[in-house]
Image (cartoon, rainbow, N blue to C red):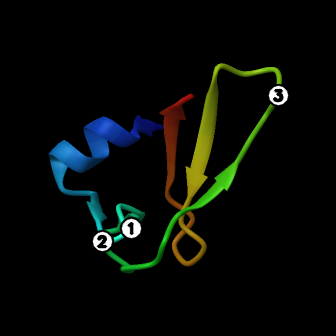
């Protein structure tokens, strides 16, 4: 699982005009899944299921 920063650098993610993260393949806005026991949140593409971790 890549981080969101690395995904942006590699071209796997894009940002729209409202600074939301989008999957570059599906062009869908990523959904956020928070786990209170972890230091990071998981961002998931609702269409293809790609996962990225985002530091909080």
| C-alpha gap between disc 2 and disc 1 | 7 Å
Q: Which mark is residue 12?
A: none
| C-alpha gap between disc 3 and disc 2 | 27 Å
Closer to us: mark 3 or mark 2?
A: 2
Q: Are marks 2 and 1 in contact (CB under 8 Å)?
A: yes
* Residue underneath mark 1: 22
Q: Secondary structure at mark 3?
A: loop
x then y, percent, for residue 45: 53, 66
For image coordinates 55% across by 78% down, the residue present is 47
Left or right relative to 8: residue 31: right
For image coordinates 45% across by 78% down, the residue present is 28
Position of 37 relative to 34 (above/below): above
For image coordinates 79% across by 34% down, the residue present is 35
User: How many residues crowd mark 3 within 10 Å: few (<14), some (14–19), many (20+)?
Assistant: few
| 42 vs 21, nearest the viewer | 21
Number of numbered discs overlaid on the protein picture: 3
**In the picture, residue 5 is in which quadrant?**
top left
**Quarter of the figure that contains the C terminus:** top right
x then y, percent, for residue 34: 74, 41
Q: Which mark is residue 16?
A: 2
* Residue underneath mark 3: 36
**In the picture, residue 31 is in which quadrant?**
bottom right
Label located before the other in sequence (3 or 2): 2
| C-alpha gap between disc 1 and disc 3 | 24 Å
User: How many residues crowd mark 2 within 10 Å: few (<14), some (14–19), many (20+)?
Assistant: few
């Amino acid at each position: 699982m890549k981080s969101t920063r690395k995904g942006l650098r590699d071209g796997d993610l894009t940002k729209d005009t409202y600074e939301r993260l989008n999957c570059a393949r599906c062009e869908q806005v990523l959904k956020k899944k928070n786990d209170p026991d972890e230091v990071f949140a998981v961002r998931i593409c609702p269409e293809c299921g790609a996962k990225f971790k985002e530091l909080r």
